[in-house]
Image (cartoon, rainbow, N blue to C red):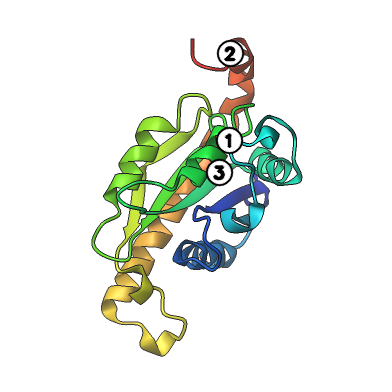
Amino acid sequence: METSDTRIMILAGSPRPGSESLRVAQVMQRFLDDQGGIAPQLLDLAQLDLPKWEDEAADHETLALNTLREAADSADALVIVVPEWGGMAPPALKAALLALTNGEVAHKPVLLIAVSAGIGGSYPIAELRASCTKNAHLVFIPDHLIVRHVEQQFPAHPGDKTADHQRLELRVKSSLSQLITYARALAPVRPTLARALKAYPYGH
C-alpha cells in the first residue's frame, strides 16, 4: 500500500463541546499531517449528535450515525482520544463504538489516547480494551498514551515548550508511527477475513 493511501480517523471521544479531548485530537491531526502522505479525518463526538440508545431513533439510520460509519469504513486505522469521567470512559463514546458493528472497523488498528485533568487516565484505557473489541473486531495496538494534566500539555506557542513537553511530543509521534505501520501491515489481512466476519459477526 502506498503511503498516500493510509487514512486515519481521529475520534475526539468527549460529548462536551470544546473539550480537551478535542484539542488533543486536533494536535494528533497536525502531527499526522506533518508526516506527509497521511490522510487524517477528525470527528468530534460532541458535534456528531448521535442518538441515545434509549431513544427510538437509536435503531434507525441517522445523518450522524452514517457520518460516523462512513468515516470509520473508509479509514485504515483509528486514533481514539478518550477522557476520564469519574474513572471511566464516557458512555457516549462506548455507544458510538457499539454502533460500529457492521465491519466498519473490523481488523483495523487503533491507538488509544486517554486524557486526564489530573494524574489519572489509566481506567478508560483498561475499560475500552476490555469491552469494545468483541463485536466491532477492533485491533488495539500494544502501545497506548495517557496525557495527564492535559491542560498543561501541547502548548500552542513553541516558546512555551519545556523539555517535558518535547519528550511527550516525541512519544506521541512514535506511537502514531507505530499505528501507521500496523495500518499498512493489516490492510491486506482484512479482505481475507471478510468471509469469517460475515459468518460469525459476533464471535460465536
The three-letter amino acid code for the residue at tag 1 is Trp
Q: Give amino acid for label 2.
A: Ala
* Marks 2 and 1, the one that precedes in the sequence: 1
Q: Residue at x 46, y 34 (%)?
A: 139
Q: Which residue is mark 2?
A: 196
- x then y, percent, for residue 188: 60, 30
Q: Which residue is mark 3?
A: 77
Is residue 50 shown left or right of residue 178? right
Q: Secondary structure at mark 3?
A: strand
List x then y, in percent, for residue 46. 58, 57
Q: Earlier in the sequence, mark 1 or mark 3?
A: 1
In front: mark 1 or mark 3? 1
Indicate the secondary structure of the residue bearing disc 1: loop
Camera-side residue: 154 or 15? 15
Q: Residue at x 58, y 34 (%)?
A: 54
Q: Position of residue 97 (x, y in %)?
A: 53, 38
What amino acid is labelled 3 in the image?
Answer: Ala
Horizontal and vertical percent position of residue 16: 52, 61
Mark 1 packing: few (<14 Cα in 10 Å), some, or many (20+)? Answer: some
Circle on res. 53? 1
